C-alpha cells in the first residue's frame, strides 16, 4: 500500500461533528463529483479510486442527508484497475449539492459551483474537515523516504485556484501548476506538509513523516561530516606530499647540514610521519610545539626547496 493510501485510510477514520461532516462531504463532492442531467433527471455521481474513500462518501451521504446512495464498482477496460462510484438520484441529488454549497443556478438551469464554499467553513474544525475531504477526493502524498511532495488534482482550474487560496489562508504555502493540461495545487516544503497533515488530522502519518525527516537529517549530517573529513584528509595528504618533496629536494641539493636545528628536526619528523596532521605532528616534539609553528617551519622548508630549484635551473 502506498503512503498516500495509508494517509487516506487514516483520514477516513477521523470522527467529526455534524457541521464538520458536512464540510468534509462538500470537499469530497467538490473534488470528485459531477452533476448529470438525463431526460430531466438529476444524477449526482461521486468518483473514487479507493474503496475506502468511496465508502466514506457513502457513509457521509447517508449520515448527513439521510439519502439512499448507490455504491458500485467499475473495472476499466484499458488498465484493468477498479474504480468506484457513489450515486444519488433525483431531487435528492440537487438537495445534497445545494446544502453542500456546490449548486448554483445559471441560465435557467443548474451548474456546480467552482469555489470553496466558505459559508460552510466559519469554524476552524470545519475548515480542517474540508481540507481532509479535499485530500480524500483528489490528494496525493509521496513517500517521504523518496521525496516531499503533496498535491491536489481537482481538475477544474477555477476550483484549483480557490483551493490554493484557501490553503494559503490556512498558513500553507501552496502553489499552482499545470501538468498534462490539468491544474494542480501542490506543497513541497516538508514542514508545510507536516503542518497540513496536522490540520487534516492525519497524526499517525505526521509522526511517520517526522520520523523519516529526522532519520534523513541525521543521515545527511553524517554524510556531510564524512565528506568534510574526507576532503580534509585529502588536503592533508596533498600538503604532506608537497612538503616531503620539498624536503627531498633540500636533501638532494644541499643536505640537512645547512638547516637550522629546528628546521632539520621538522624535516626529519615530517619524513617519519607523513600522514599526521600539523597539530598531531607538533605534539610529538619535546617540548611540543603548536600547529602554527609546525606550519611556519614546513613553509620555510618549502621556500628553501623552491630557492634551491631555481638556483639549479639558472645553472
Image (cartoon, helix red, strand yellow):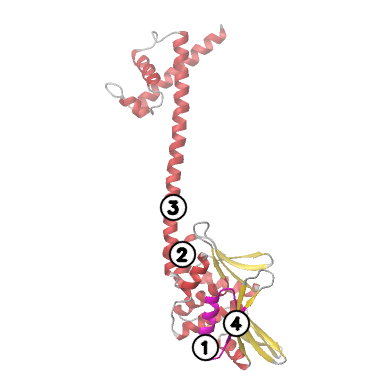
Marks 1,4: beta carbons within 8 A: no
Q: Is residue 160 above or below residue 298?
A: below
Where is mark 3, residue-wise? 217
For this rendering, which residue is in front, 214 or 76? 76
Q: CA distance from mark 1 to mark 3?
A: 46 Å
In the shown orientation, is residue 129 left or right of residue 32? left
- Observer-side mark, 2 or 4, equals 4
For the residue labelled by badge 2, is the local secondary structure a helix, a strand or a loop?
helix
Which circle, 2 or 1, is nearer the viewer? Answer: 1
Identity of the residue drawn at 51% across and 81% down: 23
Question: Which secondary structure lies at badge 1?
Answer: helix
Which quadrant would residue 210 be assigned to in this image?
bottom left
140 relative to 250, above or below: below
Tell which tag, 3 or 4, sits nearer the viewer.
4
Q: Position of residue 147 (x, y in %)?
A: 53, 57
Of the image marks 3 and 4, the number of the one nearer the N terminus: 4
Label number found at residue 35? none
Q: At 59% across and 79% down in the image, what residue appears?
A: 30
The answer for how far apart the CA atoms under marks 2 and 4 are is: 34 Å
In terms of secondary structure, where does tag 3 sit?
helix
Measuring from the top left, give residue 118's x and y in whole percent. Answer: 54, 80
Q: State the residue position of label 2.
A: 194
- Earlier along the polypeptide chain: callout 2 or callout 4? 4
The crowding category of the residue bearing disc 3, from other C-alpha atoms within 10 Å (few below 14, some 14 to 19, many at least 20), is few
Callout 4: SS: strand
On the image, the x and y values in percent for residue 108 come to: 71, 91
Find out whether residue 70 is within the magenta segment: yes
Q: Residues within 10 Å of mark 4 (few under 14, many from 20)?
A: few
Question: Closer to the camera: disc 1 or disc 3?
Answer: 1
The residue indicated by pointer 1 is 62
Amino acid at each position: 500500500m502506498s503512503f498516500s493510501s495509508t494517509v487516506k485510510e487514516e483520514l477516513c477514520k477521523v470522527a467529526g461533528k455534524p457541521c464538520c461532516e458536512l464540510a468534509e462531504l462538500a470537499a469530497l463532492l467538490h473534488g470528485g463529483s459531477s452533476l448529470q442531467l438525463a431526460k430531466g433527471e438529476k444524477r449526482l455521481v461521486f468518483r473514487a479510486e479507493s474503496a475506502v474513500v468511496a465508502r466514506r462518501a457513502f457513509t457521509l451521504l447517508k449520515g448527513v442527508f439521510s439519502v439512499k446512495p448507490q455504491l458500485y464498482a467499475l473495472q476499466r477496460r484499458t488498465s484493468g484497475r477498479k474504480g468506484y462510484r457513489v450515486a444519488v438520484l433525483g431531487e435528492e441529488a440537487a438537495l445534497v449539492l445545494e446544502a453542500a454549497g456546490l449548486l448554483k443556478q445559471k441560465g435557467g438551469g443548474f451548474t456546480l459551483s467552482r469555489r470553496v464554499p466558505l459559508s460552510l467553513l466559519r469554524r476552524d474544525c470545519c475548515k480542517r474537515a474540508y481540507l481532509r475531504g479535499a485530500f480524500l477526493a483528489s490528494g496525493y502524498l509521496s513517500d517521504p523516504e523518496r521525496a516531499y511532495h503533496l498535491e491536489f488534482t481537482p481538475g477544474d482550474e477555477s476550483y484549483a485556484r480557490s483551493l490554493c487560496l484557501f490553503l494559503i489562508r490556512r498558513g500553507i504555502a501552496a502553489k499552482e501548476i499545470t501538468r498534462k493540461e490539468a491544474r494542480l495545487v501542490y506543497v513541497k516544503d516538508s514542514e508545510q506538509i507536516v503542518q497540513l497533515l496536522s490540520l487534516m488530522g492525519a497524526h499517525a502519518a505526521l509522526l511517520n513523516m517526522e520520523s523519516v525527516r529526522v532519520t534523513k537529517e541525521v543521515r545527511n549530517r553524517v554524510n556531510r561530516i564524512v565528506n568534510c573529513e574526507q576532503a580534509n584528509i585529502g588536503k592533508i595528504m596533498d600538503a604532506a606530499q608537497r612538503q616531503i618533496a620539498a624536503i627531498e629536494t633540500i636533501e638532494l641539493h644541499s643536505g640537512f647540514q645547512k638547516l637550522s636545528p629546528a628546521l632539520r628536526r621538522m624535516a626529519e619528523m615530517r619524513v617519519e610521519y607523513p600522514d599526521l596532521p600539523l597539530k598531531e605532528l607538533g605534539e610529538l616534539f619535546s617540548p611540543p610545539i603548536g600547529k602554527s609553528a609546525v606550519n611556519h617551519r614546513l613553509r620555510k622548508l618549502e621556500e628553501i626547496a623552491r630557492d634551491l630549484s631555481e638556483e639549479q635551473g639558472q645553472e
